[in-house]
Image (spheres, helix red, strand yellow):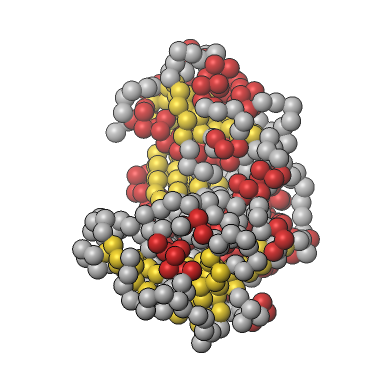
Amino acid sequence: MSRVGIVGIGHTVFGRRSDATVQELAFEAYRAALKDGDLDPDVIEATVIGSVPEYHKQRSLAGVIQEYLNLNPKPTWLTEVACASGSAAIRTAWLSIKAGVHDVVAVIGCQKMTELETAEILALMGRVGDVQWESGFGTTFPGYYAMFARRHMHEFGTTNEHLAQVAVKNHHYGARNTKALFQKEITTAKALASDPVAAPLTVYDCCANADGAACVILAGERAARKLGAGREVWLDGNGCATASMSVLRRPELTGLPSAREAAAQAYKMAGISAGDVKVAEVHDCFTIAEIMAYEDLGFCGKGEGGAFVAEKQSYIGGATPVNVDGGLKAKGHPVGATGVSMACEMVRQLRGEAGEARQVPDADVGLTHNVGGIGQYCFVNVFKKD
Amino acid sequence: MFEWFGKVNFCPHTKVDGFAAHLRAGRLMGSTCTACGHLSFPPRADCPACLQGEFAFTEMSGRGTLMTFTTIDAAPAGFEKEAPFNLGVVDLEEGGRLLAGFGDTIAPDGITIDMPVQVVPRLCEESPDIKVHYTLEKPGTTWVKTGPESGEST
C-alpha cells in the first residue's frame, strides 16, 4: 500500500501569545511549513485543523483559518478529541490521502488558551470528567492523574522523586529548545518543594497551558518523493484507540488501555516493535503520564517506569530518549497544537535537524504518543526515514 | 430530580433521574437490565451488554474498597472554599465503582489505598435547595433510610 510522507513542518513559539489571534498563530506555522518544504501554496489541496473549540471566543475556527491562509475554496474541517485533537487532524489527513481523495494536505494544530479569564478556566476545569457522576464532587484534571499516580505508587513503589525526575529531564531539554515556554533547567529539590496541586502531584508535575500552533504537510508517496527531495519522513504507523470517559469504568488505574491498544496497532502497521524506537514524544501532561507512557508503549516493563527515568534511560544516550524537545512540561501545552508539535519534532529528529544539543544520534524510527483527556483517546504514530 | 445530585450539578436531566430521589431517601441505587440481568453502577438506562433499554433500580450495599485517592488543592469553580479536600475512587462489593469525597468518620491522615469503606447517602443540610450526594465513611457507619424498604424499585 502507498505510503504517506511529511514534506514540510512549521512551529510557532509556545507561550503567552497576546500579540496574535489564533488564525495569525496558524498562519505563522503554515508559512513556516511551506518555507521548510520549499512548497508553493498551490500544491495544498485541503487543510485539517486540530483544535479544542471551548477555549476560543471565535466559533467554527476552521473556516476563519482557511480564509486567513488564503486557501478558499479548498476544503477544510476541524477535528476535536481534547488534547489529542492535533493527532486526530493528522489521522484524518492521512486517511484522506490513503483514500485517494487528496494528495497533499496541510494539518494545522492551534490553540490560544490565554484568551480565557481565570474564572472561565476554573469552570472549564471542573468539567473535565464525567459531568453526571464525577464533576459534582469537585474533580479536576490534575486530580484524576493524581489518582493514577497514587495507585501506581501503591502497586509499584513509584516515588515523588521519580515524578520529579521526569520534570527535571523535560526542563533539561526544554532549556535547549528555542520554541519552548520554559527554557530553563530545574532541580529535583525544587520540583519536590513546589506547591501541591492534587496530591501527590505538585506544580512541577503539571504542564502549563500555552498559546501556539504547529503545521505538518502530508503527501501521498509519489508526491512526497517529488516534493520532499530526500528530506521526506514517512508516517508508516497510525494507531488510534479509546478508553472509557469515566475512571469509574476503567479496568485499572496504573496505565491507559487506549495507549496500549493504539501502540499495538501502530507497531503492527509499521512492522516494528518497541525496541526499534530510537526517539519518542509522549504526552506528559503530568509527570505520572510520562511514566505510564513508558510502560504502555513497551519501552520498559509494567511498573518499571519510575526506575526507567531514574536510570536516565529516557535521556539521549539511554535506551529510548523521550521528549527531548521539553515535552508538554517545558514546551507548554496549547492543546490542539500539541499532537502536531510532536510530529514536527519527530520529523526534525529523523532528518537529523534537531541541533547539536538535542539531536538523537542515528534516529531512523520515531514515535509520537498523544493522549486526549485522561486517556479517553490515544493516537500513536510511527515515523520512519528511508 | 437529578438536579438534586451533586454539590454542583451540570446534568439535571437523565433517564436514571430516580437515582437522586432514592439517594434522598437513603438508598444507593445501581441499575439491573430487565432483559439480561447485567448490573451497572453508576446506574444506566441502556444496557452496555445487551443494548436493551429497560432497567430496574437495585439497591447497593455501599460497601467497597478504596482503589485510590487524592487531595485537591487547586479547586474548580464552586469548590474553592472547601479546598483542600480529599476524593477517592471505590470499587463496590457488588461490582461497579464510584467517586466521592470523605466524611467525618475517616480522618484525612487515616486514608490508605485498599481500606474498606462504607458509602453513605447525604443531604446537604446547609443548602436551601435540595442537594444530595454521598460520602465515604468508616465501615459500619449507619444512616437513616426513609420510604419503601430496600430492594428493586423504580
Seen in the picture, residue A64 relative to A195 is either above or below; the reply is above
Seen in the picture, residue A379 relative to B72 is either above or below; the reply is above
Residue under the image location 32 percent in, 70 percent down: B153
Image position of A229 (left or right of A269): right
In the displayed image of the protein, which residue is found farthest to the left?
Answer: B35
Image position of A118 (left or right of B150): right
Seen in the picture, residue A12 relative to A378 is either above or below; the reply is above
Q: Can residue B55 be seen at all in this image of the molecule?
A: yes
The location of residue A58, given as percent across then percent down, is 59, 27
- Given residues A227 and A65, the one toward you in this image is A65
Residue under the image location 69 percent in, 45 percent down: A119
Image position of B64 (left or right of A10): left
Identify the image quadrant of the C terminus of chain B: bottom left
The picture quadrant where one finds residue B129 is bottom right
The picture quadrant where one finds residue A332 is top right
Residue under the image location 53 percent in, 51 percent down: B10
Q: Can residue A386 be seen at all in this image of the molecule?
A: no
The location of residue A256, given as percent across then percent down, is 46, 58
The location of residue A355, given as percent across then percent down, is 66, 37
Residue under the image location 52 percent in, 27 percent down: A60
| Tally of numbered discs | 0
- Given residues A51 and A190, the one toward you in this image is A51
The picture quadrant where one finds residue A3 is top left
The location of residue A34, given as percent across then percent down, is 56, 20
In the displayed image of the protein, which residue is found farthest to the bottom?
Answer: B140
Seen in the picture, residue A128 relative to A165 is either above or below; the reply is above
